[in-house]
Amino acid sequence: MPRIRGTALVVRDGHFLLVRDKGAPSFSLPGGGQNPGEPALATAARELEAFIWWNGKDDVPRYPHVDEILRRCGLLA
């Protein structure tokens, strides 16, 4: 059964907030698996680790789903 996920899209001055879990090779959007009864925003905030502001152009190691989510939201070409 798929787990519900809380994900945040944070954009500032044309840059996207990406996070990286400890020991992970790639960046992702802030978020993670939602605990029962936990608000989605709390889920996303709980998952913040190392982070960068990505301009959508630089070659930053990231998971493929990051680009897909940003495209679906009209934030990435």
Image (spheres, rainbow, N blue to C red):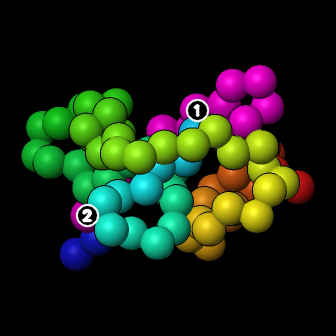
Q: Is residue 50 left or right of residue 43?
A: right
Mark 2 Cα within 10 Å, few/some/many (few <14, many 20+)? Answer: few
Verify whether residue 13 appears in magenta.
Answer: yes
Circle count: 2
Q: Residue at x 46, y 72 (%)?
A: 25
Q: Quadrant of the C terminus?
A: bottom right
Toward which corner of the image does residue 65 lie, by quadrant?
bottom right
Name the outermost residue toward the top: 13
Nearer to us in this view, 36 or 60: 60
| Magenta part of the chain | 3-16
Which residue is label 1 attached to?
10
Looking at the rendered structure, the secondary structure element under dot 2 is: loop
Verify whether residue 68 appears in magenta.
Answer: no
Name the outermost residue toward the right: 77
Which residue is label 2 attached to?
3
- Check disc 1 and give the amino acid type: Val
- Assess whether mark 2 and mark 1 are in contact (beta carbons under 8 angstroms): no
Residue 26's spot in the image, x, y percent?
A: 51, 68
Q: Residue at x 35, y 41 (%)?
A: 48
Residue 43's spot in the image, x, y percent?
A: 27, 40
> Residue 59: which disc?
none
Q: Quadrant of the N terminus?
A: bottom left
Nearer to us in this view, 44 or 38: 44
Q: Is residue 10 left or right of residue 49?
A: right
- Check disc 2 and give the amino acid type: Arg
Residue 31 visible in the shown view: yes
Residue 34's spot in the image, x, y percent?
A: 23, 49
